[in-house]
Image: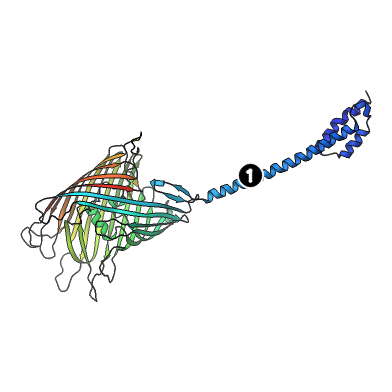
Amino acid sequence: MIARAPVARLVPTAAFAALLCSVAPAALAQAVTTAAPAASGVSQEQALSLAARLDALEKRNDQLEAQVADLKAQVAAGQGAIREEVHSQPSVSLAGSRPTFATPDGTFKIALRSIVQLDAAHYDVSPLRTDNDLGSGTNFRRVRFGFDGTAYRDWNFALWGEWGGSGGETPGLNQAWVEYAGWKPFGLTEPLRLRAGAWATPTGLEDATGAADSLFLERAAIAELVRGLAGGDGRAGVGAFARGERWYAGAVLTGKVVGVPTTPELSQQSGYILRAAWNPIHGADYDVHVGASLQGVLEPADTALGPAEATAVRLQERPELRVSGTRLVDTGAIASNGVQALGLEAGASWKTLYAAGEWFKIDVSRQVVGTAPSPFDPAFSGWYLQGGWTLTGERRAWSSASGGFNGIRPARPFSLHGGGWGALELGGRYSVLDLNDHAGVLGAAAPLGGIRGGEQKISTVALNWYPNSVVRFLLDYQWINVDRLNTAGARIDTDVNVISLRSQFAF
């Protein structure tokens, strides 16, 4: 029993030493030889073979561990390369139903934009109008395509072309501008936007709603007239815009409309637009809007050739439709060295109901020609009230982006395969545009300096269907009444009923 104990300890000791690589195989062999081989039952050759096998297993294990480590490194490198490749590729989405391409970090972004509007109208003119030049037919009111984008996170830009219009226009530029939006002075929560180029600055509440989201085919006549003084599509300018969660403010110096053919000019028009809007009452399903604007022409364009100077303004407007180009109210050219328009605006939405209205007063600074006595400075005005009711539950919410109300987005787009019916909306509006000043009386010529531009009143009802966020159809019916005297004092009144339909897609 005394001789067997060392041998019994040698085998596990040798195995343990080989696994831990703490004892050399030679030392293990020497230890085995010191014991009595016959008493242990394990020969010297068997012990040496066992030690060699353990040593080989240890080496093989080291090789496998090295291979596994190498594979892990290769996999990690491959995953990093894949992540880098994925992150370097632009993402493609349909943000706001428009194709948008952007880098993963949002530093660069570009979105394709388009608006196509085809209008069809039938004019029913009263026998009182003898020329009957309000022609029924169709017109592509807007055919726009372009893109908006962001570069280096703080620089925004846009470029749009226009192939539609009011009839008779040639294809031109709708907007082309660049702005910096990386500065938040005066404690602003949103960046101050500094812009230069050509675009349409919102000149009032109606103008703050995009052309693709309006309640009717056209803006109210007074809103459209004022819009054309110093604003409108493609108007060159430089300006600044600021906004917070519940307010908006803009200040812009403007020039001429780019891309529109004009008579030769020695000096271009210069103007300005100032506007502020506030959303004082807001909730999950209601908004209240108040605002004011001041805009005008600082210097009308000089259209005279040679050393003489001729600056004039002309106020005229169509009856809230663009299928016919006839203006039923028109002041004619007024020699002027400036125009100023003051506007007040208010609106509200509550759940599915929406209401809005604006009032404008236009003052023309008349320019005395020759030695004629100085006549008065004419003034004109207009206003409108409008409302809408969404039958399918959507509502027009207020937005500080332009200081106005957004359009309708159907909660359940139309589909014959288990979808909804889109959104349905009813609308009504009454508008007045008065371009008379010191017009005189029936049967007599106008007093000195009097303007007989006419007074236009329009009542409109609308039914709008939005199958989805891209396509919509607008059906309007208008009762148009114009009271006007000609230069001799005879009535040239007009009564017109119009039914019109717009088919539109926009993204």
> In the image, 453: left or right of 467?
left
Instruction: Bin the neighbour count of mark 1 within 10 Å (Cα to Cα): few under 14, some 14-19, many 20 and up.
Output: few
> Is residue 320 in sight in this rendering?
no
Q: Residue at position x 72%, y 41% from top?
A: 65
| Horizontal and vertical percent position of residue 376 | 16, 64
Going by the numbered disc 1, the residue's amino acid type is: Val
Quadrant showing the N terminus: top right
Which residue bears the numbered disc 1? 75
> Is residue 477 in sight in this rendering?
yes
Q: Residue at position x 30%, y 47% from top?
A: 504
> In the image, 258: left or right of 68?
left
Where disc 1 sits, the SS reads helix
Q: Nearer the viewer, residue 409 or 414?
A: 414
Q: Nearer the viewer, residue 2 or 138?
A: 138
| Horizontal and vertical percent position of residue 175 | 35, 58
> In the image, 44: left or right of 132?
right
How is the rendered protein coloured?
rainbow
Work out which residue is located at the far left of the displayed protein and give it: 443
